[in-house]
Structures are given as C-alpha cells and as structure tokens.
C-alpha cells in the first residue's frame, strides 16, 4: 500500500500539467503501471533497458525498494530526487504478515502471526531489516534534505493536502496560487486517497507482474490497525526494539490516528 500511495501522489503532482483532473491516467491505469519498479518491471525484464521506454513523461519517475546503502553511486551522486515513504513499525509488522501470504504457494502452509512477528522482529524482512532500511533513508535525508524527502504514511492520512504541497515544492513543481484557489491540491488528494484508489475498477481487476492481483494491494489503509492483531507481549517487545533501534536518531512514529499521545520515539 505504501508504494501505491507514493506512486499515485508523485505521479499526479509531478505531471499534473499534462492532463485534466478528470483525465488523470490513475483512472485507467494502476499506480504500479504508471510508476514502474526498477527491480521488478524494468531490469528484471531487460538487464540493459532503455529507461525512456519505461516512462512516457519527463522528468522520469521510477520506484524501488532498494535500501539506501545499496543504491548505486550513479543515483546517489546524480541530480535525481528521492522521496521515501515509511510507516510505523507496529502496522508494518502486520502488513508484512498479511502481504507475505500473497506469495505463498498453494501447497505451502500459511505463515502464522507468531512466525511472521518473529521474522520481522529479527530483521528477516524483504530488502533487509526494517529499521536498517528506514534509518538509512532517514539519516540520508537529514544530511541532504535537498536530495531526499522523508515522508510518513501517518502524516499523509492526517493531512494529505499539506504533505502534497511539501512534496510539490521538493520536486520543483510547487502549486501556484491559482492552482490552490482552483482546488487542484484537493483534487489530487481526493484521487490519490486510499478510498478512491481502492474503488477504481482498474485496481480491482488484473494482476501485477509478480502475479499478485491488483486488488490484493489494498487492505484497510488504517493507522493503528496493529492493535487488532498484536498481543500485549508483542507490543512490549516491539516497543523496546523501537527504542533500541531509534535511539538518538530523532525519528518518531505515530502509532495511532486517535491521539497525539500514541507516539513513540528515542530522540
């Protein structure tokens, strides 16, 4: 869901002058089709691809799950912008468990919550340990804020319009005063909302290149849903791990959309 949200927002913001709001390609194409994954959609298909063929608009936009430490210097040292979207560890542990089931073979036993939690807790996670991945981009964004924008899913859910404006400024395409008066920000926020994307017919049919039905990328999109799954013991273990991993990083997480008290950090 994180990838879909960021792809939809970045695409609609970056290329908004190419089409009318009622002709946004998101209405007929999935976010994954419009902003392709470098590792799945591009290089897996062709080791020496022509990138201009994989993105019809300029400047080109691509997606990746690769950790910051593993990015090639050709990306780190280039003028390209990097936008990173993270989600709080509690919700991510549940997302990891439920999404992992989509890759299970028919004759393979389903992963239990206990098993999935232990894997997440011990850093057995796609593209490396969760905290290493998040902190890699977080620290890089602090060192080079003009190069890397670090966003949080919880902030998008809380106030998507202000986050959109922040994103537009970072990408070098700030909303004009006229656009704001005309409601362009609100239009993009509406079409990129979890609820709108989930109800679009294009996201209900067909499958991604990985074989996962498009509709499976949408679940609840709710902040704090972890409270319906994690046991008190799991919560305690994960809270301690968050404090341990985030110590002195300055990074905080909102664990619920209900109160500002549900925030955890180790600043």
Image (cartoon, rainbow, N blue to C red):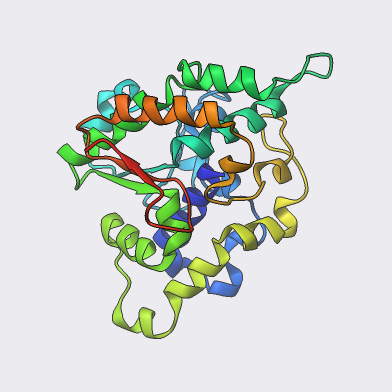
- Whether residue 78 appears in this view of the structure is no
- Above or below, 159 relative to 243: below
Return the residue nearer the eye: 191 or 162.
Answer: 162
Check the picture and name the quadrant holding the N terminus.
top right
Total marks drawn?
Answer: 0
Say which of 73 and 104 sits in front: 104
| The quadrant where residue 240 appears | top left
Q: Relative to 124, is 45 on the left or the right?
A: right
Query: In x, y percent, where is residue 99?
Result: 64, 32
- Left or right? Give the position of 242 relative to 9: left
> Residue 247: x percent and y percent?
24, 29
Q: Work out whether residue 85 can be spotted.
A: yes
- The answer to whether residue 251 is left or right of residue 60 is left
Q: Nearer the viewer, residue 23 or 124?
A: 124
- Snapshot quadrant of residue 132: top left
Furthest toward the front, the residue is 232
């Amino acid at each position: 869901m994180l990838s879909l949200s960021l792809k939809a927002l970045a695409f609609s913001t970056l290329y908004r002058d190419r089409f009318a709001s009622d002709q946004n390609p998101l209405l007929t194409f999935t976010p994954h089709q419009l902003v392709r994954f470098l590792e799945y959609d591009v290089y897996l298909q062709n080791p020496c691809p022509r990138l201009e063929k994989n993105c019809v608009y300029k400047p080109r936009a691509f997606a990746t799950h690769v950790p910051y430490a593993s990015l090639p210097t050709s990306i780190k040292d280039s003028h390209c912008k990097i936008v990173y979207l993270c989600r709080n560890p509690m919700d991510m542990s549940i997302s990891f468990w439920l999404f992992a089931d989509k890759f299970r073979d028919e004759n393979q036993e389903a992963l239990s919550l206990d098993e999935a939690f232990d894997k997440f807790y011990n850093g057995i996670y796609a593209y490396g340990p969760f905290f290493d991945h998040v902190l890699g981009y977080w620290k890089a964004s602090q060192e080079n804020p003009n190069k890397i924008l670090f966003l949080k899913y919880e902030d998008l859910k809380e106030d998507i319009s202000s986050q959109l404006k922040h994103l537009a400024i970072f990408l070098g395409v700030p909303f004009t005063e006229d656009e704001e008066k005309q409601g362009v920000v609100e239009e993009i926020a509406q079409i990129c909302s979890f609820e709108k994307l989930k109800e679009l017919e294009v996201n209900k049919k067909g499958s991604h290149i990985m074989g996962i039905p498009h509709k499976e990328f949408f679940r609840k999109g709710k902040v704090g849903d972890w409270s319906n799954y994690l046991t008190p013991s799991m919560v305690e273990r994960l809270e301690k791990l968050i404090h341990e991993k985030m110590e002195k990083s300055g990074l905080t997480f909102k664990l619920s959309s209900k109160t500002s008290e549900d925030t955890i950090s180790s600043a």
